[in-house]
């Protein structure tokens, strides 16, 4: 979701430039001229503007749901793997502590060797944990980019037929008000799902 936010900012910036013209008052002998913006009503006539509720797209686009399910499953497997290894280390620590309290180590060298073995396994566990989650995060970001590109590319192709001048992205409450007649969210969702379904069948 946040990866898509920069796109919203860019579109809004372009829209502002299109809807406002600058009016300036010049003052003699000044190095800088003060500029003021004023609304030109004629500039917005004939412009076709629609919007898409991105939250709805993410909840209803099957590709997005499949990616989310896939990444949750992989994270659960990582957690299960790490949990099993953590329990084994904890058991070894308990046995080590028991031997310390019972003073059953044959020599100081045996005690030092057992302690260092536990320390080594703990370090290996933390290294593996960091590597697994780093790989998962990298894959999650790649899949997110794939999803974003899928949505953006479809919208661009779809607009070749529709010919809208601006397609805004509604995320949360970033658009305070918009006439629902200009909401093409389900039009986009249905098109995305139809295309995704055809790709799965291939």
Image: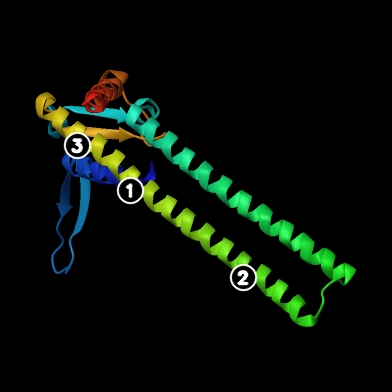
The residue mark sitting in front, 2 or 1, is 2
Mark toward the start of the polypeptide (1 vs 3): 1
Point 19% across, 36% down: residue? 153
* The furthest residue to the top: 181
* Residue bearing mark 3: 153
At 40% from the left and 28% from the top, the residue drawn is: 59
User: Do residues under tags 1 and 3 come within 8 Å of each other at their CB atoms?
Assistant: no
Q: Alpha carbon of mark 1 to alpha carbon of mark 3: how far? A: 16 Å
- The colour mode here is rainbow
Taking depth in this image into account, of 147 and 134 the one nearest to the observer is 134
Q: How far apart are labels 3 and 2 at the CA level?
A: 49 Å
* Residue holding disc 1: 142
State which tag comes first along the sequence, 3 or 2. Answer: 2
The quadrant holding residue 120 is bottom right
Q: Is residue 186 above or below residue 172?
A: above
**Residue 47 appears anywhere in the view:** no
> Where's the C terminus, which quadrant?
top left
Label 2 Cα crowd, 10 Å radius (few <14 / some 14-19 / many 20+): few
Q: How many marks?
A: 3
Residues packed near mark 3 inside 10 Å, few (<14), some (14 to 19) or many (20 plus): few
Q: Quadrant of residue 152?
A: top left
Left or right of 70, for residue 46 = left
Q: Do the CB atoms of the residues marked 2 and 1 lie less than 8 Å apart?
A: no
Residue tagged 2: 120
């Amino acid at each position: 979701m946040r990866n898509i936010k920069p796109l919203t900012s860019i579109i809004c910036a372009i829209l502002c430039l299109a809807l406002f013209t600058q009016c300036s008052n010049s003052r003699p002998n000044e190095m800088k001229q003060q500029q003021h913006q004023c609304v030109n009503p004629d500039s917005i006539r004939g412009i076709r503007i629609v919007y898409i509720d991105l939250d709805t797209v993410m909840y209803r686009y099957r590709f997005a749901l499949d990616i989310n399910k896939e990444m949750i499953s992989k994270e659960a497997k990582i957690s299960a793997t790490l949990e099993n290894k953590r329990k084994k280390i904890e058991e070894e620590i308990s046995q080590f502590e028991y031997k310390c309290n019972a003073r059953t180590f044959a020599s100081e060298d045996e005690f030092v060797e057992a302690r260092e073995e536990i320390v080594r396994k703990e370090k290996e566990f933390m290294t593996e944990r960091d590597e697994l989650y780093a790989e998962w995060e990298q894959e999650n970001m790649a899949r997110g980019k794939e999803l974003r590109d899928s949505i953006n590319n479809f919208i661009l192709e779809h607009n070749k037929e529709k010919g809208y001048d601006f397609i805004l992205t509604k995320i949360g409450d970033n658009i305070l008000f918009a006439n629902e007649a200009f909401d093409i969210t389900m039009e986009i969702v249905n098109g995305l799902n139809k295309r995704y379904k055809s790709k799965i069948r291939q």
